[in-house]
Image (spheres, rainbow, N blue to C red):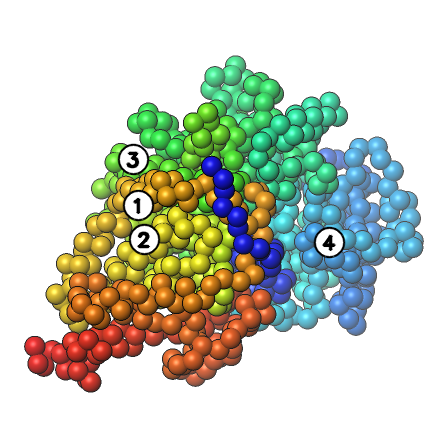
Amino acid sequence: MATASPPQVQIVAKDSKFNQFVPPTDVLQIQYSYGMTGHCSGPAPPDLFFDKLLPKPEHVSAEGPSLEECLARADFQPVQKAKAERDMQIRLNECIRKIKLSKRLQIFDTGDKRENSTDQRPDHQLELLPEGEPNEQWEHPSNTKMHKPRPFNFWKPSLAIESKFSNGKDGFTDDKRSVTNNTTAGSRTRGQLGLYADQQFACLHMRFLYQLEIVGRHARILYYDRSGVIVCKSFDYALEKEYLVRFLWLWARMTPEQQGWDSTVRDATAGERQTFVDAVGRFLSSTPRQLPVGYDPRGTGSKVYVVQVADDDQPSGFHEVIIGSPFYTSRSVPGRGTCVYLAYSTIAKEICVLKDSWAIDDPAFEPEKNILDDLKAANVPGCPSVICGGDVVVGDDSQATAVQDWATNQEYREWRTPCSPWIHKHVHRRILMDFVYPVECVKNSEEFLTVIRGVAECMGHADQIGIRHRDLTPAHMGFVDTEDGIKPILMDWDHAGRKDEVIEVKPGGVVPYCSGTVQFMSADLLQDHAGPHETRRKTHCLIDDAQSLLWVLAYGAFHWFHHDVITALGTVSHNLFDEMSKPVHAGGPYLWFGGQMKRDVLRQRLLANLPFASPVLKKVLTAIASKWSEYYNFVMIAESLPIYKSNAENAYAQLEDPFWYVEQITAALEAGRGAGELPIADRAIPAGDTRDAVPASFDHKQYEDDRTSTFAEHEAGGDTSSLVETGIARMPPRRALRGGKRKRKAKDVDADVYKPPKMKRKGRDESPENVAPLGAPWYSRARTYLTEPLNRMGILGKNGVKDWKANR
């Protein structure tokens, strides 16, 4: 059957994961400072910090000058006499070189050169040379011509040092009431340090790492792991130089494992590296589909490693795989730190996928492998095939974080900032699985809808055995090619929860935590997730996963297929997934609130009858979004008109059932094939590419007719059974979405250059830079559209609901 010809398209933007843009560095710094709040334990006394978190002098190498000799040579007075920050950095480099801590130690001035790939610029980098390699800095410590500035190398195990001239720029404080300096300058420094640590975690296989912060006349040592950071109390590095010299002296003699390196990972030999490169080359060349660029780990400048994965079937107890750079990383210091790699199995001699993460060690979060084993035993369709996996074990112990122990140890209450309920123990786990194509590799919308249908079916069968995924995103959906077509796969079950009454907190809830990726979380979760888990008002229910399925459907439809949604929806499509409000701090990390735009877009039925090239894709999105529109609006009307409560309950029952989505998609696909609408070549960009595509033009008149046809039918027949949809269909598609009063005319907005306007609401400045890094909440809450259609139908008087109640 001939395929339909798609309209001309124009590539308009590069998509970075789920955002329309990558925030600039200064915005990222604020984001990371918010993320670190509640995950900082301190200020720890320096003696206790050295005793608990650093090796004893007798446990490190004895080569080179003794600690006493280095202390005698150390003099940091010139650093404190510096007149500017750049002068301070140069003097600090010179002072550390003159101490001659070790023949293997090198310090580089990196404060004047930005690292190209990350745009980061730590001020100093300490590295250890391999054994026996000559060290020019040792031979000529005062020759400044040899020590020209260079960018920081995040791919080498090293110590990052950040120096600030002003005391006000310290990211932390010595105040027991709050260890974090929450001034603008302090927050930026704390976020800056967090960015450096996160980049090192992403490039290196580290269990933990150290940092050194020099601010004015004082210094402090930091210890990072996936639970947060332990902050040492500041000390005068000139008057109390023994602390600084002792730390540098110890670090220069530590083994890689003592510096934080994961001992279950080693550098690949030349032969293993070549084997890996050849295997990946054969795999990529034989793959019938185009994979995203990030899937190819060759030529990225990263190293190749051999990694151990727990495997009870092997005599050694582990399965060795060879990996390069990850094709997926989740970025933040506290958290799971998930990385996913293309891996070459040294046993099966084939390409597979390795998932490496630091999972929360909590009864509410069961190990992912246990969840997958139960799904497999119940024959749930659409689950990934696991080869092996489990905790990363060294000796008899699993690798785990340490910061949470400092945050909860009652002996440290005298000096420690009150701990936060958000600090959890994280355990290191790896899972090896068969390869699965990511969902963006679909060739057309028919395959995409097949994946969405398969995921919904998997959700339904999993719920029947009491398991819910709780983190539906495009990154967690994929498929494999079979003789009968594609087979959808739902991956990444590490957020999954069980419907267990032991941990259930209220009917419909799974666990006392809301989880998920912000861009695809339901509007209800984003708007009602405040407070520690003991007082949380909203739990993660099955209907939240169902709404996440809708947002994945909309995201894929907007990004990968021919349409003119941006013309139809204006700037809504650019902000829908990333719209967030100001953060709220409740004794823990800052919580970003969102979901208002998602809820309003559904209430106004803005996702219905959008101009997609595929009639089937348009029909599916319209059917699902319209049902959500019906539900939200019946819920809102039922507050004043209780007669509509049953309508809301009926809509809820349908939306909560994953098999309802299966029925809707199956019916649309069958009807499309019967009508000759499928297959259609509507992929706007090559499969595997992640750019946005927008058609050059579309039929605006047809779009308006589709939007208003429902209202005309109801106005003629007087049928009020779909009262909410009647009102929504009457709304113009491109009205001005601005703060304050609703405007009658829609202002033409160039979606590529549009910036949300500065607004004043309740005396607060809510311009984008002061509201949220990923988009301002400029979409106002307009409820008048609900009463207007009721007035036109004669149901409400001029006084609205009050008048109706008085005369009923």
Q: Which residue is mark 1?
A: 664
- Work out whether mark 1 precedes mark 4 in sequence or the reverse, and give the earlier one: 4
Residue at the top extreme?
A: 315
Q: Which residue is mark 4?
A: 115
On the rendered structure, is 96 left or right of 272? right
The amino acid type, in three-letter code, at marker 4 is Glu
User: Within 10 angstroms of label 3, few (less than 14), some, or many (20 or more) residues?
Assistant: many
- Residue drawn at point x = 21 percent, y = 70 percent: 716
Q: Would you say the residues marked 4 and 2 are in contact, meaning their CB atoms lie under 8 Å apart?
A: no
Q: Secondary structure under badge 2? A: helix
Front tag of 4 and 2: 2
- Work out whether mark 4 precedes mark 2 in sequence or the reverse, and give the earlier one: 4
- Work out whether mark 2 precedes mark 3 in sequence or the reverse, and give the earlier one: 3
Q: Would you say the residues marked 1 and 2 are in contact, meaning their CB atoms lie under 8 Å apart?
A: yes
- Work out whether mark 1 precedes mark 2 in sequence or the reverse, and give the earlier one: 2
Residue 137 at x, y = what percent? 86, 47
> Is residue 72 in view from this perspective?
no
Residue 401 at x, y = what percent? 50, 42
Residue 371 at x, y = what percent? 36, 33
How far apart marks 1 and 3 lie (CA) works out to 17 Å
Q: Nearer the viewer, residue 645 or 307?
A: 645
How far apart marks 1 and 4 lie (CA) works out to 50 Å
Q: Which residue is mark 2?
A: 623
How far apart marks 1 and 2 lie (CA) works out to 8 Å
729 lies above or below 373: below
Task: Tell me the quarter of the picture where residue 532 sits.
Answer: bottom left
The amino acid type, in three-letter code, at marker 1 is Gln
The amino acid type, in three-letter code, at marker 2 is Ala
Q: Which mark is residue 461?
A: 3
